[in-house]
Amino acid sequence: MEPNKTEEFYTRLKAQLEDTAIWPTAYLYKFILPTDENKIREIHTIFDNLGAVINSKQSKKGTYTSVSVNVTLPSADAVIEKYKAVGAIEGVISL
């Protein structure tokens, strides 16, 4: 898990999501990570079989890659579960 993503953060996020969304809903994740095909593949695997639309774009120098994932999820808990799964990949920053 990212060091700056505490349980308090996830509790606040869950409350915000439950207040503003009607479930199931489409959710857009944005991640930045050092360009590494294995790590990008791990993100794809986390969202596999969910009908997610995943776009990747390398930085100008190719050092970093931004990954956007648009996916419909059934609940705020499902959104947070995916954040935690991706956060476990070393070097990934959630935006």
Image: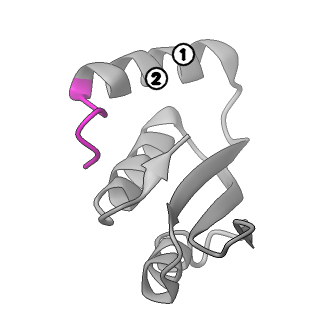
Residue kind at label 1, given as amino acid type: Gln
Q: Give the magenta part as a residue range.
A: 1-7
> Label 2, on which residue?
13
- Describe the colour scheme in one phrase: one colour
Q: Is residue 5 magenta?
A: yes
Residue 77 image point, x, y percent: 42, 38
User: Which of the two residues, 53 or 95, is positioned nearer the viewer here?
Assistant: 95
> Which residue is painted at 54% across and 15% down in the image?
16
> Label 1, on which residue?
16
Residue kind at label 2, given as amino acid type: Leu
Residue 28 image point, x, y percent: 70, 46
Q: Is residue 86 magenta?
A: no
Cα gap from disc 2 to disc 1, whole angstroms: 5 Å
> In screen coordinates, is 59 left or right of 45?
right
Q: Residue furthest front?
A: 61
SS for dot 1: helix
Q: Quadrant of the C terminus?
A: top right
> Which residue is painted at 56% across and 54% down in the image?
31
Residues under numbered marks 2 and 1 in contact, where contact means CB atoms less than 8 Å apart: yes
